[in-house]
Image: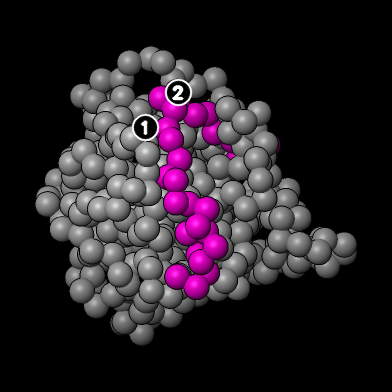
Amino acid sequence: MNVVFIVGVVFLIYSTDNVKAEFNAGTENLANLMNAVYKHRIADIITEASRQDQLHVQDYLNGTGLPHRIPTQGRLQAKTNASKAFLQGKQLCPIIPLELVGNISDVNLTMPMNIDDLIAEHADVLNGGEWAPLDCVARHRVAFVIPYRDRWSHLKSLLHHLIPVLKRQQIHFRIFVVEQYGKDIFNKGRIMNAAFREALKLFDFHCVTFHDVDLVPEDDRNIYSCVEMPKHMSVGIDKFDYRLTYDQLVGGVLMFRTEHFQQVNGYSNMYWGWGGEDDDMYRRIWHQRLRVHRPPTNVARYKMIKHDTRELSKNRRELMKTAAIRSKTDGLNSIQYDLLFTHTEKLFTHFLVDIGHFEDTDQLDDSQIFDFY
């Protein structure tokens, strides 16, 4: 096993040097670096995988167990199947997953989905929506947070298409669906912050993916793996002709390393109504001297499930002016909510949270006071 690991490390270093050589030869920005990385067949995970694997090996050899960044209150729950498999002597999963099929854009988003059929199809998924490969140890553990309200058909469609992709990518994952209690104006930032805090208590994850319920992946080469910087995965969406509509866009599907999401203090809690929290997040990322990685649009493609038009929050422009300044006090460290229940469904863990009410109705006109999801 030691020989295999050493050979793997040498391969990782060699591949990483090749990617860096392309970058030093003429690329000057992170977007070009990510393109170079993806040209090496998803080698964007190589550097991080090498570093993490060495840390994990050292932890287990020293008997310290889980990575030290896991909160104390979550350590007991965090001994997942993947860490147990490692202790049993299994090999790490291949850097390049062997079962990828590439473009899967011929997905049918109008076909009715039966939840019982989905459950039967994924009988190997543990209660709560957790899955890990059995024949190897996943290189990454990823929590998926899906903000939700009144879109049951969309959620079933997303699960139908997303779960097989994650299995082929050999990701150890757990899916969390967070729902806002009541019929008040939707606040996506608040419920995502609440879900992140609750998920930390239940699952030991390296990174977290915030995934809109109406976006379905079209290519399994767009790997849901952890990288060194926040990764905006939904670069190309069919509704927008697969083009990034503006450079600061990070909405749709966004992945963070756990410590990076804590570093930016999560999402703003102040955007009532649809929109704004994602653009605010872009400013938080840059304010913390982090950068956004994007895979190229030929793999970072999604289909959007049709839904009713949603109105924008009226106060978003004013809030945006203070996004960086507010980030220190508005976010994970200030979110107030009541967890009404945690239900362990077969394919996901369901949080219902009460985040309070929008009190200043003068900021919204009558046409904007309705359910946004």
Rendered residue at 49%/29% (across/down)? 304
Q: Which residue is mark 2?
A: 306
> Mark 2 is on which residue type?
Lys
Residue 114 included in the magenta stretch of the image? no
Seen from the viewer's position, the closer of residues 133 and 275 is 275
User: Which class describes the residues within 10 Å of circle 1: few (<14), some (14-19), or many (20+)?
Assistant: few
Residue 42 in view? no
The quarter of the picture where the C terminus appears is top left
Q: CA distance from mark 1 to mark 2?
A: 21 Å
Q: Secondary structure at mark 1?
A: helix
- What amino acid is at disc 1? Ser
Within 10 angstroms of label 2, few (less than 14), some, or many (20 or more) residues?
A: few
Q: Report the front residue among 63 and 194.
A: 194
Quick one: label 1 or label 2, which is nearer the N terminus?
Answer: 2
Q: Is residue 271 above or below residue 5?
A: above
Q: Residue at x 43, y 45 (%)?
A: 313
Answer yes or no: do the residues labelled 1 and 2 have beta carbons within 8 Å? Answer: no
Image: magenta residue range: 298-326
Q: Vertically, is 212 above or below 5?
A: above
Q: Position of residue 44 (x, y in %)?
A: 63, 57
User: Residue 40: image x %, image y %?
Assistant: 71, 51
- Residue pictured at 47% horizontal, 32% vertical: 216
Whether the magenta-drawn stretch holds residue 311 is answered as yes
Q: Nearer the observer, disc 1 or disc 2?
A: 1
From the viewer's perspective, tell me whether residue 239 is left or right of residue 308. Answer: right
**Which quarter of the picture shows residue 180?**
top left
Does dot 2 land on a helix, a strand or a loop? loop
For label 1, the residue is 367
